[in-house]
Image (spheres, rainbow, N blue to C red):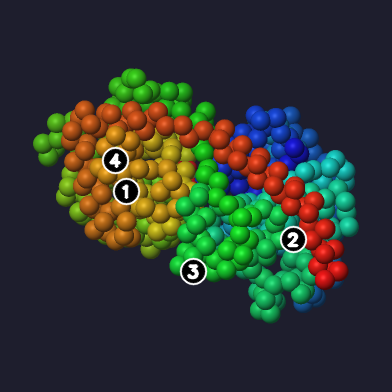
Amino acid sequence: MRIAMVSSECEPYAKVGGLADVVDALARGLGQLGHEVDVFLPLYRGVRPPAGSHRRALAVARATDPSSADEDEGDVATVDLLTGPADGYRIRLVDHPFSYDRAGLYGETGADYPDNAARFTLLGRVALETISEEGSQIDILHGHDWEAGPALLMQRHLYASDSAVASAASVLTCHNLAYHGWVARGQAWQLELPETLGAPDGIDLLREAVAVADIVNTVSPTYAEESRTAAMGAGLDDLLRSRADRYLGIINGIDTTLWDPAADSIIPVPFSRDDLSGKQACRAELGARHGLQLGDGGWERGAPILGMIGRLDPQKGFDLLASAAPGLLEAGARIVVLGTGDPALVRGLQSLATTRPDRLVVLDRFDRDEARRIYAGADMFLMPSRFEPCGQGQMISMRYGTVPVVRATGGLVDTVRDADADPQAGTGFVFGPAEPEALVEAGRRAIAAYQDEGRWRELVQRDMALDFSWGGPAREYVAAYERAVASRRQAPLDAAQRQLA
Ligand code: ADP
């Protein structure tokens, strides 16, 4: 199949969270299955196009602010499209400095850019215009999150009579239902979409995209079920339920070649399931570099290090960690946190760290290399998420022999099994309520298991043997694409029937 993806993130070019890992690895996984994939991505500041990329100019219509008095404001944007090889797929970078050459991907200092609707409309516009111009029939337009909403919607409106574009079936993957891409009516001119679309006060891009895509999916079966409920549907549960079997859950994988402790050139000493001595070295290095006291307190093997990496957002439960930290430290834990985001959460954790610098370290930055050293060097990995569509962190940590301590929600339920409840097949420690006490209790159970050296080694080795590769999930996407194609063939018939009725 020929697949055109539209995404606001993709490794190794632009990353804020798991979306970037997933788009890159899925595109590669599909390439390995023999499919042809293009990924359209903004050329943000600092993104380096791959060697061998070629550039061409493209003129696309641009919506202009009707309230603007600026006569010079053109209604055509000249954009450069850079196309390059990306290890199994093609990356297509949209170069429009006014829109993308900025300090952030989505915003700065905690505030979204006010023209995000226009920025991601331009991304979609360039994707569709390129497909139209190149005239090479694509089978699937695959959008990721609300940022691809404009592309999916323009396909069915602005490009409805352009057969190269309109004939493709569409798939929308919701990586996180919390972000809707709300555009107030007064700003809706940024979207090149019919004025009748949406509610009187504005347009919810994610909602509209969920309604229009031939197939919609989210990134784990459990989150697909949870999001059909009012409590967890982020206001979309009604619509998701109405999509019935056209809304499904496909678990993410991780890229097991990029995340491989035996071949990781960043970590101090590589290691494998059969030889864990390197993990001990990584652990010692992590502790020493951050001034953690691993040896005191009567720990025969050194105190356990609990790592936590992620966007500092209430979703991820960093506030639970802040309240649970004293209890975990009391139980003997050393804690390393790496994350950026909510300034109040950062301050809260940092002030806690100043009281126990030998036990708690808070690194307020985005640092891919340090993340690897934590995945490798920690003993346990914390993911006390309030909700979790899938999560990459718990799978990466297991691959590095770092036992996850997670809340029972979404993709965490589908990937981690409690080792006390199921001693034979358990892979981590799972707790239910989103309460600090529950996190402390799960942490204590993990620490108790860590004290039993034989049991712990078995758990570490079991986690490292798990297969989280993309092969299976990529095949599930292919099946979803096939269903989308079939339902698109059916769609004109449905419309004709509706007209007859
Ligand atoms: P989400 O997509 O909700 O942010 P995931 O667990 O699915 O959460 O993916 C997070 C990804 O981003 C992982 O690859 C993780 O290592 C990475 N990551 C998050 N925060 C940081 C950070 N501060 N520095 C480096 N990598 C980070």
Q: Disc 4 on helix, strand or loop?
A: loop
Q: Label 1 crowding class (10 Å Cα cut-off): few <14, some 14-19, many 20+? A: many
Marks 1 and 3 close (CB-CB < 8 Å)? no
The residue carrying mark 2 is 153
Rendering quarter of residue 71 = bottom right
Name which residue type carries label 4: Asp
Foreground: disc 1 or disc 4: 4
**Of label 1 and label 4, which has the lower sequence position?**
4
Q: Disc 1 on helix, strand or loop?
A: strand
**Of label 1 and label 2, which has the lower sequence position?**
2
Report, in whole angstroms, how far the alpha carbon at label 1 lies from the one at label 4: 11 Å
Q: Label 3 crowding class (10 Å Cα cut-off): few <14, some 14-19, many 20+? A: few
**Of label 3 and label 2, which has the lower sequence position?**
2
Report, in whole angstroms, how far the alpha carbon at label 2 lies from the one at label 4: 46 Å
Foreground: disc 1 or disc 2: 1
The residue carrying mark 3 is 230
* Residue at the image position 78 percent from the left and 57 percent from the top: 491
Q: Check residue 430 in the rendering and tell me which mark sits there, or answer none.
A: 1
Rendered-image quadrant of the N terminus: top right
Of 343 and 181, nearer the camera is: 181
Against 227, residue 258 (above or below) is above
